[in-house]
Image (cartoon, rainbow, N blue to C red):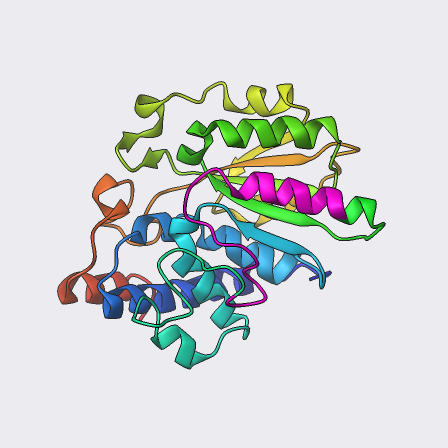
């Protein structure tokens, strides 16, 4: 997209995606709800106001695949029939992204720490080929426990991949506890800077801040946007609760979650 969408429209779009996302999870009796809700605003901004034709997005935090599926359905890139088969036998939309089932999802991701190495390689490839194409990669903060993330960050900084933007969905929770207790990342911004990145730190649910961070010049450096988010965002009983990394919803919980989206 070349023209940013007004914030009220982005907010309404994000609500539609959350409603669809919650419906998918209730129907499938699937977990990983909190992880998807924390990044829906980021996905909304990327697909409605940032990515241009030819740009590439890589979802490294593959356990949030359903949020991407819901976003792509709202964008008109998936059919309703495909969405209805989410997490079912013979689906093209499994719990973690499958490779090349759809043009928008070029690689399989689920094992954490792979998305940034792939994204850096794609970004370098575009440069070598002389193509004006950008790459955006969405990581989780817990994923940054992986050494492969930092190897790729070193690579991206060394090659000054200014066509690469890394967004870290820093919701502060990972599979076994609080991120700062499992393996502390702070000073997080300083680490990315030391690896050669231009760094922005923002509220990951503020569309104006997301837009400002992604549009600000990073010079000849790759960009890292540390997005402080809320796990389970938009559903009061899920927000900042570790258990919603795993739990499915029952009918009562689903109805309450939907009500909180304005329906």
| Apparent side of residue 62 relative to residue 181 in the rendered image (left or right) | right
**Residue 100 in view:** yes
- Outermost residue on the right side: it is 130
Residue 198 screen position, x and y as percent:
68, 29
Residue 39, percent across and down?
44, 49
- Give 137 or 47, whichever is nearer the viewer: 137
Residue bounds of the magenta highlight:
101-125
Q: In this view, does 105 lie above or below 120?
A: below
- The one nearer the camera, 129 or 23, is 129
Image position of 112 (left or right of 212): left
220 with respect to 102 (left or right): right
Count of numbered labels shown in the rendering: 0
Does residue 91 belong to the magenta stretch? Answer: no
Which quadrant holds the N terminus? Answer: bottom right
Taking depth in this image into account, of 254 and 92 the one nearest to the observer is 92
Toward which corner of the image does residue 196 lie, by quadrant? Answer: top right
As rendered, which of 100 and 78 lies closer to the eye? 100
Q: Is residue 107 magenta?
A: yes
């Amino acid at each position: 997209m070349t023209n940013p969408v007004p914030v009220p429209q982005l907010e309404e779009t994000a609500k539609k995606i959350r409603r669809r996302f919650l419906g998918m999870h209730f129907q499938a009796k699937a977990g990983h709800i909190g992880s998807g809700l924390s990044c829906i605003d980021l996905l909304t901004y990327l697909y409605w106001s940032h990515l241009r034709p030819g740009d590439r997005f890589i979802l490294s935090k593959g356990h949030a695949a359903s949020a991407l599926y819901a976003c792509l359905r709202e964008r008109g890139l998936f059919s309703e029939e495909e969405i209805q088969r989410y997490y079912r036998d013979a689906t093209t939309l499994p719990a973690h992204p499958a490779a090349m089932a759809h043009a928008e999802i070029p690689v399989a991701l689920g094992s954490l720490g792979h998305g940034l190495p792939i994204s850096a390689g794609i970004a370098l490839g575009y440069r070598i080929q002389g193509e004006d194409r950008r790459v955006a990669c969405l990581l989780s903060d817990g994923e940054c426990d992986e050494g492969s993330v930092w190897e790729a960050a070193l690579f991206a900084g060394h090659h000054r991949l200014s066509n690469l933007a890394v967004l870290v969905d820093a919701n502060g929770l990972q599979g076994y506890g609080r991120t700062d207790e499992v393996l502390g990342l702070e000073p997080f911004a300083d680490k990315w800077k030391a690896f050669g990145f231009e760094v922005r730190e923002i509220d990951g649910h503020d569309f104006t801040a997301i837009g400002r961070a992604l549009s600000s010049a990073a010079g000849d450096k790759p960009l890292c946007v540390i997005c402080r988010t809320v796990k389970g965002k938009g559903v009061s009983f899920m927000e900042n609760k570790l258990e919603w990394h795993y739990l499915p919803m029952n009918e009562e919980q689903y109805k309450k979650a939907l009500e909180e989206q304005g329906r």
